[in-house]
Amino acid sequence: MINKKSKIFIAGHKGMVGSAILRSLKSKGYKNLYFIEKKKLDLRDQKKVFKYLKKIKPDGVIIAAATVGGINANNTFKADFIYNNLEIQNNLIHGSYLNNVKNLIFLGSSCVYPKNSKQPIKEEFLLSNYLEKTNEPYAIAKIAGIKMCSSYNYQYKLNYKCLMPCNSYGINDNYDLKTSHFLPALIKKIIEAIQDKKDYIKVWGSGKPLRELIFCEDIADACIYFLKKKTRHNLINIGTGNDKTINQYAKFIMKHLGVNLKILNEKKKLEGTYRKLLDVSLAKKYGWSYKTSLDKGIAITINDYLEKKVLTKSKNI
């Protein structure tokens, strides 16, 4: 099994979740960590991925690499989302098997579950109904990854686990309004409104859809925890069991920043699934639960955004 001397490859180490995993592994004393820049290894290139895995011979692999984005990006770049994600995960999962990797974590998303699932969503609800259309290509790619891991476990007696987090947020998030998820978009809009002395922000949709959030460091903790653990289930939800509406999150951020701006809801914009609260009882049964409160997580995230904004501004001067 995995220990602190094991070789661990983190795919996607520059992303929000991947960088959190790398930080967490280092802080826990893991020394044999492998990661590589995207420009040096395109994870969509099968030959190069297989060659790299053969070279490093990892004991464990964590797949945090993916093409991801918010509702606008998912709905606009459907071909990119299905092609890139299928290529990345196929190469990493099969390449890991070929190189005798017994322990692997594949990260997915709560959007793999049907649009109108009963709440909270249990792992067994997978493929029980239709998906949300705006992110269907991404969800189908991730479902393929789940089934690939379970099939390899069945046929080759491996320990490949699929963790399905709810909406993630935190340090090193993406704040590009064209591709970001809703929370970083809200943070950016509110802070820019304050700086521009506006008394309002515009929010996509009615603001009524509910979303569950988990801090990126908690996802990292879950990845490390389950990488080391033998489980009977290969699909496990990772979340907090709590959700709020989009507008409530906007007000929550405003409270942290000491402002009270008007919310103008753009009701003609896409909204996606109304609610997708995860049932996290299985993760708890295995001994894992989240640690970071929303208050603490939001404060850290806002500070990270402001620090990066200052650094970016200083570089452009």
Image (cartoon, rainbow, N blue to C red):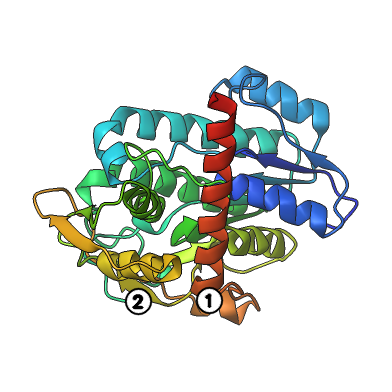
Q: For the point 55% across and 34% down, which residue is it?
A: 312
Amino acid at circle 2: Pro
Residue 215 in picture, x, y percent from top left: 54, 63
* 201 in relation to 137, above or below: below
Amino acid at circle 1: Leu
Residue 158 in picture, x, y percent from top left: 68, 52
Q: Nearer the viewer, mark 1 or mark 2?
A: 2
* 278 in relation to 202, above or below: below
The residue beneath circle 1 is 282
Is 97 in front, or is 166? Answer: 166
* 281 in relation to 20, above or below: below
Query: Dot 1: few (<14), some (14–19), or many (≥20) neighbours within 10 Å?
Result: some
Q: For the point 63% across and 77% down, which residue is it?
A: 286
User: Can I make out residue 151 in this image?
Assistant: no
Image quarter (top left, top right, bottom left or bottom right) of the N terminus: bottom right
Q: For the point 60% across and 39% down, which residue is it?
A: 93
SS at badge 1: helix
User: Can I make out residue 66 in this image?
Assistant: yes
Compare marks 1 and 2 and give the one earlier in the sequence.
Answer: 2
Residue most toward the left? 268
The residue beneath circle 2 is 120
Q: For the point 68% across and 38% down, which residue is it?
A: 96
Figure quadrant of residue 177? top left
Classify residue 150 as left or right of residue 104. left
Image quarter (top left, top right, bottom left or bottom right) of the C terminus: top right
Is 22 in front, or is 316? Answer: 316
Classify residue 174 as left or right of residue 78. right
